Image (cartoon, grey):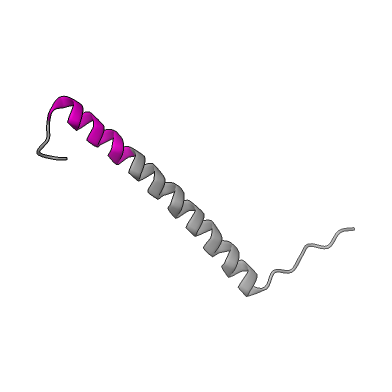
């Protein structure tokens, strides 16, 4: 029989913080990609007022 590991509050906090940072990084990268697409599209269309 295998016992389940006991996590300390500090380990739980570190894990949660790590997951939040990873998700924030992914979200930021997606947002940057979207902004680049929008800017590229507007520049192609000749709409330089927004860029």
Front in this rendered view, residue 5 or 34: 34
State left or right for residue 41 relative to residue 18: left
The vertical placement of 6 against 20, above or below, is below
24 lies left or right of 16: left
Q: Is residue 44 above or below residue 24?
A: above
> Magenta stretch: residue 26 in it?
no
Which residue does the image show at 58% across and 67% down from the upper left? 14
Identify the residue at horizontal 62%, vertical 74% (top origin).
Answer: 10
Query: Which residue is located at x 50 percent, y 54 percent?
Result: 22
Q: Quadrant of residue 13?
A: bottom right
Q: Residue at x 32, y 38 (%)?
A: 34
Whether residue 39 is situated above or below residue 26 in the rendered picture: above
Q: Residue at the far bottom: name it.
A: 9
Tell me where residue 29 appears, x and y as whole percent: 40, 45
Determine the image quadrant of residue 19: bottom right
Horizontally, residue 5 falls left or right of residue 2, namely: left
* Magenta-colored span: 34-46
Considering the image in quadrants, where does the N terminus appear?
bottom right
How many numbered circles are shown?
A: 0
């Amino acid at each position: 029989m295998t016992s389940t590991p006991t996590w300390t509050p500090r380990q739980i906090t570190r894990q949660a913080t790590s997951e939040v940072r990873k998700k924030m990084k992914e979200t930021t990268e997606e947002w940057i990609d979207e902004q680049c697409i929008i800017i590229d599209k507007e520049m192609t269309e000749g709409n330089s007022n927004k860029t």
